[in-house]
Structures are given as structure tokens and as C-alpha cells.
């Protein structure tokens, strides 16, 4: 059996200050201690600063921007992969005039 979710930008919910499409866990809405989502950050906007108890990885699918973790700020672009440690405030910035899409994956921190 194959199940499929079709992307519809008009109906993507807003979380963390951006369009946020939860992909995993399948069929569950709201928070979970592990999962995958697509963050769609509009041109000239940023996500809201936040932290998680889980580790988080980002894969930049499309666009360019910056990630801020605490006082550190790094440029990001399509193909980059980043990891954010648990408990660290982070924000994704899109100063460009194109959409920035980031695949986010979070999971319990190792050793916890």
C-alpha cells in the first residue's frame, strides 16, 4: 500500500513564524519528540526564536539565508545540513527575495 500527502501551500499551517508542514509522524498533528517537517520561510522573514529538548537537523532544500544559534550566525544554502543541540535558541532568517525551504528533523538527544 502507498499513502501520499500532497503539498498545498495555501493550506500549510503556520508554526514557528513560517509555513510548517509536519510530515512525520504520519497522521498526527501537533508536537512530538521525533518527527520531520518542511519549513517554508517567506522572503524577508525569520522564524520565531525557539529551543527544543530534542536535537534537530536541518537540510536546506531550496534558497539561502542564515541560521542563528545563540550568538553564532552562519550562512546557509541549498544542500547544506546543520545540527542544533538540544536547548539552544535558534532562528532561521531569509533575507533574500526567494522562498527558503528547510527540511527539519528532530529526535531525542543521544544518551538521554
Image: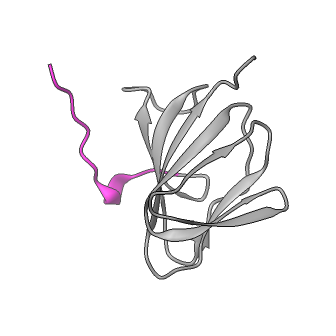
Q: Residue 75 vs residue 9: left or right?
A: right
Q: 99 or 8, which lies in front?
A: 99
Total residue callouts: 0
Extreme residue in the bottom direction:
97
Q: 83 or 21, which lies in front?
A: 83
Q: Residue 91 vs residue 76: left or right?
A: right
Task: Give the residue displayed 64% in from the left and 44% down from the top.
Answer: 83
Q: Is residue 3 magenta?
A: yes
Magenta: main secondary structure = loop
**Looking at the picture, how far across and down is residue 54, in whole percent?**
69, 31
**Looking at the picture, how far across and down is residue 3, in whole percent?**
20, 28
Q: Which residues are magenta?
A: 1-14
Residue 16 lies, with reference to residue 106, above or below; the image says: below
**Looking at the picture, how far across and down is residue 65, in whole percent?**
57, 70
**Looking at the picture, how far across and down is residue 100, in whole percent?**
47, 66
Task: Give the residue displayed 45% in from the left and 63% down from the top.
Answer: 78
Location of residue 24 (image quadrant): top left
Amino acid at each position: 500500500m502507498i499513502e501520499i500527502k500532497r503539498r498545498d501551500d495555501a493550506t500549510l499551517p503556520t508554526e514557528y513564524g513560517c509555513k510548517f508542514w509536519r510530515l512525520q509522524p504520519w497522521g498526527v498533528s501537533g508536537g512530538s519528540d521525533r518527527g520531520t517537517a518542511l519549513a517554508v520561510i517567506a522572503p524577508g522573514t525569520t522564524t520565531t526564536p525557539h529551543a527544543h529538548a530534542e536535537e534537530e537537523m536541518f537540510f536546506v532544500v531550496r534558497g539561502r539565508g542564515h541560521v542563528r544559534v545563540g550568538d553564532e550566525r552562519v550562512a546557509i544554502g541549498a544542500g547544506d545540513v546543520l545540527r542544533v543541540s538540544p536547548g539552544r535558541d535558534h532562528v532561521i532568517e531569509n533575507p533574500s527575495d526567494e522562498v527558503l525551504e528547510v527540511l527539519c528533523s528532530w529526535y531525542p538527544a543521544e544518551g538521554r
